[in-house]
Image: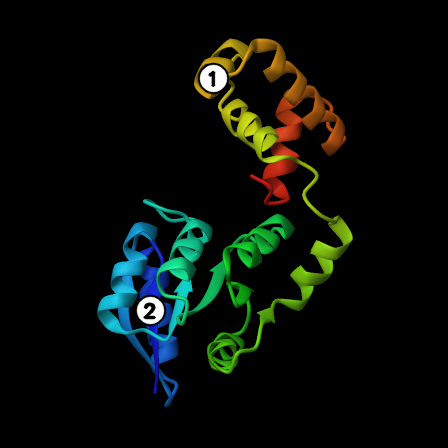
């Protein structure tokens, strides 16, 4: 029997996933959480073999939770399941130690198959997303540029971003200019949108 933990903040989606997986003779949902910062403890307490993680959750997002789980309990397999099939998310999920990456509109049979396959040591990636990720290419932004863009996403001024990140205003302007150039954006708001749409933020 394969023991699975579900981490999904939307109760209706989480319960539907549990019901679907419960139809499989060899899969049992042994724990459910609604927050990313509860994943490690829930896996430890339940003895889950596979953790099924949504990306967007309170506490810790699914990518950060995956990295924490990989460090704390490396034997647990990790499946990222998300509504957002963004190429950058795929790259970040693999860097965090995920074994599989699927979008939520995939057929239920594919999810059960992915759970079985990751337990056998295979890597499972949504084929359409993999093709898109190859077409888009790698994230062109540095970690500091991502920090600056995240801070800019709420409409903060250069001064506010500089204060928040403990940088000079000139450095913030340089990073924003670099972000605009690398994303081929019209302005910083467009750079934020492009980076977000590609899953780089």
Give the residue pinned by disc 1: 166
Using the image as rendered, state which of residue 199 and residue 11 is in the foreground. Answer: 199
**Residue visible at 55% across and 11% down?**
168
Quarter occupied by residue 38:
bottom left
- Residue 52 % position (x, y): 41, 66
- Above or below, 71 against 100 in this view is above
User: What is the C-alpha distance between the residues marked 1 and 2?
Assistant: 39 Å
**Residue visible at 57% across and 77% down?**
122
- Marks 1 and 2, the one that precedes in the sequence: 2
Q: Quadrant of the C terminus?
A: top right
- Residue 107 % position (x, y): 53, 74
- Above or below, 151 against 32 in this view is above
**Residue visible at 51% across and 9% down?**
159
- Above or below, 20 against 24 in this view is above
- Residue 18 % position (x, y): 33, 72
Quarter occupied by residue 158:
top right
Residue 115 appears left or right of 178 = left
Q: Residue furthest left?
A: 45
Where disc 1 sits, the SS reads loop
Give the colour scheme of this rendering. rainbow
Using the image as rendered, state which of residue 165 and residue 83 is in the foreground. Answer: 165
Give the residue pinned by disc 2: 5
Where disc 2 sits, the SS reads strand
Q: Quadrant of the N terminus?
A: bottom left
- Above or below, 143 against 43 in this view is above
């Amino acid at each position: 029997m394969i023991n699975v933990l579900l981490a999904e903040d939307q109760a209706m989606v989480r319960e539907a996933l549990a019901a679907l997986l419960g139809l499989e003779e060899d899969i049992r949902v042994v724990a459910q959480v609604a927050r990313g910062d509860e994943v490690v403890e829930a896996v430890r307490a339940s003895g889950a073999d596979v953790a099924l993680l949504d990306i967007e959750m309170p506490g810790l997002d699914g990518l950060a939770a995956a990295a924490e789980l990989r460090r704390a309990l490396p034997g647990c397999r990790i499946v990222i399941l998300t509504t957002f099939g963004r190429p950058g998310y795929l790259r970040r999920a693999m860097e965090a130690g995920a074994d599989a990456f699927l979008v939520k509109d995939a057929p239920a049979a594919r999810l059960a198959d992915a759970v079985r396959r990751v337990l056998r040591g295979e890597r499972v990636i949504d084929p359409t997303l993999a093709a898109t990720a190859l077409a888009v290419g790698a994230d062109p932004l540095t970690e500091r540029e991502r920090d600056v863009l995240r801070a800019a996403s709420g409409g903060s001024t250069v001064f506010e971003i500089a204060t928040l990140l403990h940088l000079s205003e000139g450095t913030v302007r340089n990073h924003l200019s670099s972000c605009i150039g690398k994303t081929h954006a019209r302005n910083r708001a467009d750079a934020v949108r492009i980076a977000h749409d590609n899953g780089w933020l």
